[in-house]
Image (cartoon, rainbow, N blue to C red):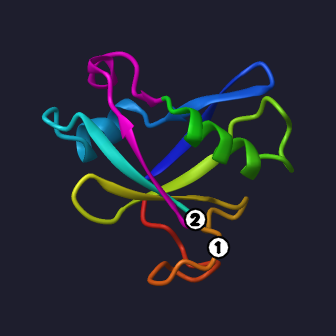
Amino acid sequence: MVVTSVCIGHRVAGLYIGARNVHRYFPRSVTEIELQLDHLRIQCGLSPDFWQDQPEIHDRRLCIWLESRQRSEKANATVPLAMIPSGKNVFILDLVNKKGTKHTHGIEGRPHENQHVGI
């Protein structure tokens, strides 16, 4: 699935999942997910509003990682990311380049650079 960063001013505030992705990939019984960010794996809680009107994930560590990946983009621009299911409530997060293909950062078992991401 393709998701985007959420920016407030010049700061990244979270990750926008979108209502369609929430209903497709996130059962209501799930209260937290794991995100694989390069070599870092973090757990992020999902608020009750996640399934209602705020399909976003907010986590300080996630925001720091997103900001480090957005340095080449405009400061307040949202950036598309690939969020790939990788197990029960586990997702790999990576940048999508302008051609709609996924970058890789050397994690074994991940698609190679320029391999299309299933959306």
Q: Label 2 belongs to which residue?
A: 38
Are the residues tagged 2 and 1 within 8 Å (C-beta)? yes
46, above or below 101, in the image: above
Give the residue displayed 58% in from the left and 52% down from the top: 81
Give the residue displayed 31% in from the left and 17% down from the top: 49
Disc number for residue 14: none
Q: Quadrant of residue 90?
A: bottom left
Is residue 51 rendered magenta in the image? yes
Q: Amino acid at mark 1?
A: His
Drawn side of residue 69 relative to residue 88, left or right: right
As rendered, which of 52 and 31 lies closer to the eye?
31
The image quadrant where one finds the C terminus is bottom left
Q: Which residues are magenta?
A: 39-57
Q: Amino acid at mark 2?
A: Asp
> What is the x, y in percent for residue 91?
38, 57
State the CA–CA distance, disc 2 to disc 1.
6 Å
Instruction: Judge the density around disc 2: few (<14), some (14-19), many (≥20) Cα neighbours within 10 Å.
Output: some
Drawn side of residue 23 relative to residue 101, left or right: left
Which of disc 1 and disc 2 is earlier in sequence? 2
> What is the x, y in percent for residue 80?
62, 47
58, above or below 86, in the image: above
Q: Quadrant of residue 73?
A: top right
Q: Quadrant of residue 103?
A: bottom right
> What is the x, y in percent for residue 89?
26, 52
Q: Label 1 belongs to which residue?
A: 105
